[in-house]
Image: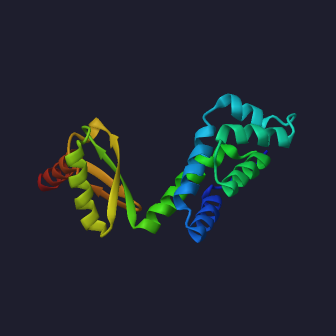
Amino acid sequence: MPRISSGKRYARAAFELALEKNELEVWQEGLKKMADSTTDQQLMALLQDPRIPFDAKKSLLQKRLGEIHPLAFNLAALLVSKGILSRSGDIFQQYNNLLDVHRGVERARVTTALLLGTEEKEAVSRRLGEVVDRKVVIDGQLDPSIIGGFIARIGDTLIDGSIRQRLETLKKSLLETGK
């Protein structure tokens, strides 16, 4: 059974190599191909089959990934040899996080009751950018239970501007006043 570990150290190593050679986008594309390959159940079954020799697995992987940075392919082969190619999605996500930090971009998970339009997304992105003093890219989620407004999570910071929260605060205030 493979040891459980985060994709963070692999992502960090890949990022440092890519940064050193100024190949950030090339590595990002390669890591995306690796992550996408894990959705192919048939391929994953073959790559995890202990009866198939490693060279055959490597050949299968090369055909599936196509044109990819040679060092990114070596990483994919290493993950296959360790039986942890399924973690390449986490590695890709961690790499993107490092790339965002390098570029001065902060990701915010914004939850709204209704789908935001392009202009609304840009307005929220600008306002959040003013709060954290960085460019903010929004990953949107829907949750009708918040009634209105939004809840934003940027790293460890939570900004709750939802109607549900305001109603809860008003309720507590009214209950305390009524005592």
Q: Quadrant of residue 128?
A: bottom left
* Number of numbered discs overlaid on the protein picture: 0
Q: Residue 141 location in percent, x, y?
A: 35, 42
Residue nearer the viewer, 51 or 173: 51
Residue 115 lies, in percent from the top left, at: 26, 38
Q: Position of residue 18 (x, y in %)?
A: 59, 64
Q: Is residue 3 shown to the viewer in this render?
A: no
Residue positioned 31% across, 67% down in the render: 132
Query: In this rendering, would 170 be left or right of 55?
Result: left
Q: Give the image's coloring scheme.
A: rainbow
Name the outermost residue toward the top. Answer: 42
Q: Is residue 114 visible?
A: yes
* Viewer-closest of 155 and 179: 155
Give the residue at x 72% y 40%: 61
Split into 4 quadrants, where in the image is the C terminus? bottom left
Left or right of 136? Residue 26 is: right
Residue 133 percent location from the top left of the image: 30, 70
Question: In this rendering, would 18 be left or right of 96?
Answer: right
The quarter of the image holding the N terminus is top right
**Residue 39, above or below 96:** above
Q: Nearer the viewer, residue 103 or 172?
A: 103
User: What residue is at 62 percent from the left and 55 percent from the top?
Assistant: 7
